[in-house]
Structure formats: C-alpha cells, structure tokens
Amino acid sequence: MKYPTQKIALAYFAVAMALFAIQVLGGLLAGYVYVAPNFLSDILPFNIIRMLHTNSLIVWLLLGFFGATYYLIPEEAERDIESPMLAYLQLIILVIGTLGVVVTYVFDLFPGNWLLGKEGREFLEQPLWVKLGIVVAALIFLYNVTMTVLKGRKTAITNILLIGLWGIAIFFLFSLYNPGNLVLDKMYWWYVVHLWVEAVWELVLASILAFLMLKLTGVDREVIEKWVYSIVALALFTGLLGTGHHYYWIGTPGYWQWIGSVFSALEVAPFFAMVVFAFMMVWKGHRDHPNKAALLWSLGCAVLAFFGAGVWGFLHTLAPVNYYTHGTQITAAHGHLAFFGAYVSINLAIITYAMPHLLGREPYNQVLNMASFWVMSAGMAFMTFTLTFAGTIQTHLQRVLGEGYMDVQDQLPVFYWMRFGSGAVVVIGVLMFLYATFVPASAKTPQRASAAPAE
Amino acid sequence: MRDTERTGTVMPETAGDAAADEDRAEWGPLAALPGNPMMWLLIWSELAVFSLGLIGFAIAWILDPETFRQSQATLNRLAGGINTMVLVSSGFCAALAVEAQSRKQGNAARWWLAAASLLGLVFLVVKGMEYADKAAQGIGIDTNNFYTLYYLLTGFHALHVVLGIVILIIVGWRNSLENLETGAAFWHMVDLIWILLFPVVYLMR
C-alpha cells in the first residue's frame, strides 16, 4: 500500500463482505422455501426473502466497486484520495440506507407511504428516502474520485473506471422516474437494470480486471490499455441497443424483437474478448506474483463471466426462443452464473489482491482462498446446470404443452433439492473465503516464495 | 509504401513517429491494417450486426414467402439502383482522397472528400424520397415483417451514411494520412453493406 488513503477500501470491503454473507444466507433460505413452500411463510414471506437476496447482492457489489475504486485510484492517479472524510461519510450514508431498507422490508413498515414505504418495482423496491440517500452518496463519491483523478495522473484504467461510475450514477436517476403507464415504467426500469449490468458495470469490471492484470502479470500498460479500450468499445456497441432484448413482450413496438435479438446476440463478444485478454496477459507476463489466489479469481472471473453472462445469456436472448423461455428457471440459471462469474468474482479478485496490502501482511492463507474459489465455483456451476435442466422441462411442460404453472412446479422438486444442496456448497465456499481473507494465518502456513518483486 | 513509413526507418528525423510506431506495434495483428485499429473493431462489429440482420431477413422470408414477395414488389428498384451507383462512386472519391493525401496533395484530397460527402447526401435524398413515397402509401415499420426489416436495415444503414459524412468532414479538417485512411475505411464499410443490402432486400426473389 503506497498511499495511506487506500485504507478507505478496507472499510468498504468489510461492509461488502458482511452483506455478502447475508446475501448467500438469504439465498439458501429462499432455496429451502422452494422445496418447503410454507417455511416461514407467515413471518418472512418468499417475496421478502428474494428482495433481501437481490438487493443485498447489488448493494455489496456496489460497495465492492467503491472499495476497489478507493484502492486503485490513488495508485493510478499517484496521489491520495481528495477527502477521506467524505469517503467515510458516503459509506455511513449507504450503511444507514441499507439498514433502513432491511428493517422496512422485514417488518413491512409504512406501506404506501410516498417517502418511507417500499416502492414495489423489482430490484428498485427501496423507499424514496433511501433512493435519495443513494443519490447523495453517489454525488459525494463522484466528486471525491473525480477530483482525485483530475489533479493526478490520468490513465486508461481510471478514465474507463470513472466513465463506468458516472454511468452507474446517471442511470440510477431513472429509478426516481415511475410513470403511470406500465409499458413506460418497464422501459425506464430497464435503463437502470440492463444498462447497469450489461453496459456500465462492464466498464467497471474491465477496468478492475485491467488493473489486476497490470499488477499480477507485469505486462506493459500500453498493451493492456488497448485491450481494455477494445473490450469497452465492444461492450457499449452491443450492450446499449442490447437493452432491446427486454422490450420483446412489455408492449413496445415489434421491431424491438429484431434490434434486441441482433445486438444482444453479440453481447457475448466483449466477454469472449475478456477471456482472451486475461489468458494472453498471463501467458505473456513475466512476473511471478506471489498472490496466486488473486490471479485465480481474475482468470475465473473472465471464464465464468463468459459462460454465465455470454453463453447462458445467448441461450435465451433471441426473441423466438425467449417467447418460450421468458421468466422460467432458465432466467434464474443465467442470472446466478452471470452475477457470480462477472461481478462477484471481480470483487473477490480485487479483495483477494488488496487485503494483504491493506492489512500489512504477506499474501496469506492462499490455499484456503483458492480452495474457496473451487468450492464456490463448483457449487454455482452445479446450481446453474440444475436450474437449466429445471427450466428446460418447465419450458416444455408449461409453454409448449400448456400445463398449469403449479402443476409443472410439482414435477420439479428433484431439481430444487439439488439447487438447495449446491446453494449450501456455495455458502460453505463463502465462509471459507471470509475466513481466509479476514482471519490472520498462523505462522506455519506455507508461503510461496516470490521470484520477482511484487507490487 | 505506407508500410515503410510506419516502421519509422525512413523518417529518423521525427522521434514522435518512432514512438507512434511502437504504439502501433502493440495492436498486434491489427497493426498492419490502414487507419486506426479501433475503426476496424467497429467495422467488424457493424458487419456482424448487418450479417445477423440479413440472416434474419432470409429466415423471415422462408417462413412467409408470399408476404415478402408481394411487399418486395412495391420497392423502387430504380431508386435503389441509382443509389448503388451513387454510393460506389462516392467510395471511389474517398479512395482518391486517400491516394491524393499519400502524395501530400492535401487540397486535392479535401476536394475528393467533399465530392464523396456530397454523393453521400445525394444517397440520403434518394432514400428520403423512397421513404416519403412509402409513407404516402400508408406503409410503415409495423405494416408487416418485411417492412419492419426493410426499415430497420435500410434505416440503420442510412444512419451510418449520416455518421460517415460527419466522419469524412472531421478527417477533412484534421487531415493526417492515418485519419483519412480511418475515415475512408468506415466509408467503404458503408458502401459494402449497401452492396449486400441492395440485392438481398430489393432484388432477390
């Protein structure tokens, strides 16, 4: 750690990891409700569990992005963060908002209240006061990091990171616009949901991945920059109009079926480029960095994002296919592997890389961390296959043969049991990761000798 | 000739060029292409999009040949043919602009670029007349599957003609040889896509 203000990242990572634990436990609970539908139905209904599962995921990923930004901007800009005080204030606002959200959801407080009640749109259920708090926190954050970069060295990595972060804040503003017309409501809703995960988050992902490749492989910055510009260009070229693949059946004109199908079919391209990029850099790299676990997570991120977001996304993105698969367990399979592969993995990669520096330790508990990668990834891959099979059967019985929704659900428990099991494996992997990251290693943990000086 | 310029060996007096050439080498296999490598990434992306569009058009035709045949008969083939000549001539002007620039004749290059842009405008006017004619007959993008694809493919292409003219104006203003090559590469891509669109959408039965 070269700059004292990089330490801000530690607080962000700690809160993010706490929410990560809550998120996967919520997921496990939801997975159990799938096989025992009346479990907790009076005190904590399924829709609330699902809200906690998805909302905590998004918040912790964002906190991870913020932490990653506070960690890598000083090194890239070669100066300290403009105001550490503002950075901690931002975190406090976000934590208060998160706690407010959890309490409001769980106890169903202030239903229907315009300011305090939950707003009901999927993923954007947060009460208005929390949304406004998020906007304030985003403004503080953007001021803080933009000023730091403007006064310091400007690199491709920070430029793309800032464009991505500004995009996140700008598109979030559409969550405040809730037109009465249901078609327009959905249309703008996707401006937040789609343009986050399939456009601007990809910029943040590419930027963090580039930073990790720069540090871990030692390949020239100029080479890495060209890859990142290419990946980002592909992501925006395909991802922006790719929004059309959400406009097939919401009441928008029919030509969206063509625009959405064509552009979203190509969304696999930036993810494929990321795989080639990551492996090329490792292959070309001359640095034997001691933090093997961070490298494993980086490569795993590229590969799993390619399969989860790219391949599993393509699986049901063409309008004629989506006509049958829309909203089945195929979507759940894609959602799980895409979020885990792309955004969970990149966060865990940067955390794995940064924590030894933030805590002033050598890379530690590498074996346990790497084992947690395989356990988590295996659990998530099994869950994805299970849900894909469940979704295929569901599509055939329900959409092709026309059986009733619940009649079909009654034929799927074997898959839901296997999904619950694989979810438990993921939770075990997460606990292993948290232990490996936060609990200091004992002195006799074997360390790998580093051949080249590490950054 | 351009290749020797890029290696920097023939112009040792400019250190900046040597740095630029080193910068270029980092593009790997893209380094050998004329113009900016990022433009080629865009060109391949565009070709992929229009290819998927034309494949979709072919599949939609197979699924409903009667509607497609009847609808296609309403298209103005003469206008499409004229536009093909216009755009190919425009591409030739862009190529001559690059040729003139490589001989250090900056003014001639600008005139050729102006001619290329002007022909691009002629294309847009003819296209606009076709659209106006269709609109007068009450035919729109939602009339049937054929017209949805007709408007999407030709409309998307026309937007690229607009963007191409803007690019030609920009490279005429900042007229380094690399910029001209970059702009001409985009303009030829717009040509190429039209040469694929015209027979598939207007002519093939």
Image (cartoon, coloured by chain):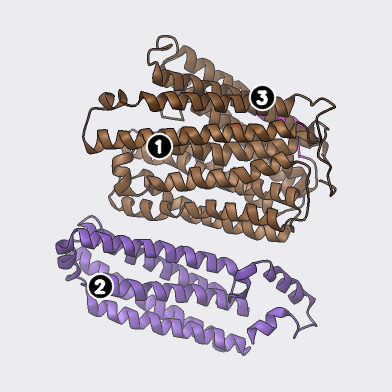
Q: Nearer the viewer, residue A413 or B184?
A: A413
Q: Chain of mark 2?
A: B
Colour assignment, chain A: brown
Residue at 27% over, 37% down? A396
Please tell me which residue is depicted at 75% across the width and 41% down the height of the picture.
Answer: A291
CA gap between label 3 and label 2 equals 62 Å
Nearer to me, A74 or A181: A74
The residue that mark 1 highlights is A388
Parent chain of label 3: A
- Image coordinates of residue A447 in percent, x first then y, are 81, 36
Q: Position of residue A20 (x, y in %)?
A: 60, 27
Q: Is residue A112 visible?
A: no
Q: Amino acid at mark 2?
A: Tyr
Residue on which disc 3 sits: A92
Please tell me which residue lies in front, A273 or A162. Answer: A273
Q: Is residue A45 magenta?
A: no
- Is A85 within the magenta? yes
Residue B155 located left or right of residue A217: left
Please tell me whether mark 2 sits on a helix, a strand or a loop.
helix
Residue visible at 34% across and 62% down in the picture: B53
Q: Is residue B12 above or below residue B162?
A: below
User: What amino acid is at disc 3?
Assistant: Ile
Read off the residue under disc 2: B202
**Depicted A259 relative to depicted A143: above or below:** below
* Chain drawn in purple: B
Q: Are marks 1 and 3 on the same chain?
A: yes
Same chain, labels 2 and 1: no
Q: Name which quarter of the figure residue A100 lies in.
A: top right
